[in-house]
């Protein structure tokens, strides 16, 4: 559609490149751009083919397991919470940096997510795992959201049933993040996904308490009592959808609401009263749940070690998140107490010391933008579940 005259300009519509509109471009410039695009496409295709052969298998899965390329973004997922969507809560020009950093990291690592879901649900693989129980604080809920959102937005037909117990009102400490104070996309305690083939994924917070109708006051104590009395653990009675069997995989994290000795005591309680007895229950070796502990994601407050500080001193450091910290004190304690093969099956490191730019911000240097850093941690959880 270009004139043969080099100086002639025209709007160009390129069908093969997904409706890219190029305005006021000379023919010579357009041909140069075309060559660059061809080279880039060839490079990407060659790299994908060489780097991950299993990715290609995604193109030949059953007809009811289709791969979409976009993923979730800006409340396109039925499990997303508005205050964790940086795209939705953008308030000032600097917020766009967090949104883009998180989204770009997600897209750059989308192949990790594809790989994990292929191993878990591609072909007949979904028969390996059945009942997954995730419990912990709001950071574990983010990991659940990541797994659920990638499942329902990247793969058509993978989920048979989903349920979210949205709150009529959900607490939020920052008005700039609370654009949806209640109802859909506000906040939830319990949520569930039932996958095709029968695999179940359920989240319940380990300390609910705000609404006894939809949450338990202390899941960790209940798990310890069940281990002592029966040698097993259950989902309890507060899952969003009813369960169809015992817990096969327990995914747990103590979270950020404990500090110092209280945090250490809670990790020890989980290790000694729940995890170690389950691991060493010789009467139920084959049927005991597999235990995956995820180290507490890193806080990136502008403090000496990145950890949130309360009181007047804390308010001084709340204004911005730092991009990187040298250590995560909570993860250090968890790695000291927990050992794979002894009191957990898998100790999965969140590995996020340098991801401070991906936090929600606006005085929240604990939670991450979604999609973003925790989507890759969630994919690694799914990898671990498939492997054990």
Image: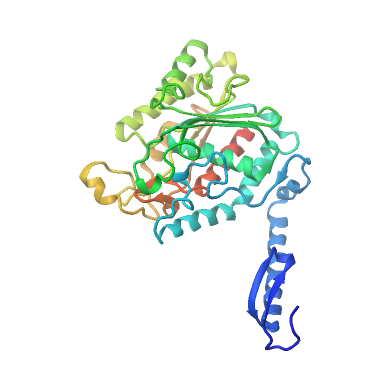
Type of colouring:
rainbow
The quarter holding residue 39 reads bottom right
For the residue pair 331 and 201, the one nearer the viewer reads as: 201
Q: Residue at x 69, y 56 (%)?
A: 48
Q: Does residue 271 appear left or right of residue 259 in this picture?
A: right
Q: Quadrant of the N terminus?
A: bottom right
Name the residue at 22% across, 42% down. Answer: 311
Question: Where residue 81 sits: x, y (%)?
Answer: 48, 41
Residue nearer the viewer, 98 or 110: 98
58 vs 193, nearest the viewer? 193
Q: Which residue sits furthest top?
A: 229
Total numbered labels placed on residues in the image: 0
Q: In x, y percent, where is residue 94?
A: 40, 60
Give how far across and how far down residue 166 sits, in percent.
Answer: 49, 33
- Image spot of residue 121 (x, y percent): 69, 36
Quadrant of the frame with the C terminus: top right
Decide if residue 120 is in sight here: yes
Position of residue 319 in the picture relative to residue 343 (left or right): left
Residue 3 image-quadrant placement: bottom right
In the rendered view, tell whether residue 163 sits above or below residue 90.
above
- Does residue 380 show up? no
Name the residue: 44% across, 42% down.
180
Considering only vertical position in the picture, is 90 above or below 157?
Answer: below
Q: Residue furthest left?
A: 312
């Amino acid at each position: 559609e270009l004139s043969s005259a080099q100086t002639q300009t025209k709007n160009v519509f390129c069908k093969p490149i997904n409706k890219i509109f190029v305005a006021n471009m000379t023919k010579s410039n357009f041909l140069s751009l075309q060559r660059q695009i061809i080279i880039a496409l060839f490079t990407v295709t060659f790299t994908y083919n060489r780097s991950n052969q299993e990715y290609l298998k995604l193109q030949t899965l059953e007809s009811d397991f289709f791969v979409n390329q976009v993923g979730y973004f800006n409340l396109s997922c039925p499990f997303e919470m508005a205050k964790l969507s940086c795209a939705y809560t953008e308030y000032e020009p600097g917020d766009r940096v967090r949104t883009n950093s998180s989204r770009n990291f997600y897209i750059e690592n989308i192949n990790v997510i594809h790989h994990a879901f292929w191993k878990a649900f591609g072909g007949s693989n979904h028969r390996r795992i059945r009942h997954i129980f995730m419990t912990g604080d709001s950071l574990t809920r983010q990991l659940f959201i990541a797994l659920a959102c990638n499942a329902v937005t990247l793969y058509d037909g993978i989920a048979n049933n989903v349920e979210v117990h949205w709150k009529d009102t959900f607490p939020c400490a920052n008005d700039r993040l609370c654009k949806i104070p209640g109802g859909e996309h506000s906040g939830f305690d319990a949520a569930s996904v039932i996958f095709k083939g029968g695999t179940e994924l359920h989240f319940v917070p380990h300390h609910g308490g705000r609404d006894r109708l939809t949450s338990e006051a202390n899941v960790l104590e209940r798990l310890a009592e069940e281990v002592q009395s029966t040698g097993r653990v259950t989902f309890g009675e507060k899952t969003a959808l009813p369960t169809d069997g015992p817990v096969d995989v327990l995914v747990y994290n103590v979270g950020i609401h404990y500090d110092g000795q209280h945090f250490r005591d809670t990790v020890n309680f989980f290790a000694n009263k729940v995890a170690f007895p389950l691991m060493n229950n010789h009467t139920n070796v084959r049927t005991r749940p597999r235990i995956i502990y995820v180290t507490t994601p890193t806080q990136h407050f502008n403090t000496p070690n990145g950890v949130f500080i309360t009181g007047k001193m804390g308010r001084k450091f709340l204004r911005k998140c730092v991009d990187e910290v040298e250590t995560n004190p909570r993860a250090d304690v968890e790695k000291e107490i927990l050992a794979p093969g002894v009191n957990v099956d898998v100790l999965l490191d969140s590995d996020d010391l340098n991801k401070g730019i991906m936090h929600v911000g606006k005085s929240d240097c604990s939670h991450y933008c979604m999609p973003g850093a925790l989507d890759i941690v969630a994919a690694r959880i799914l990898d671990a579940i498939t492997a054990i």
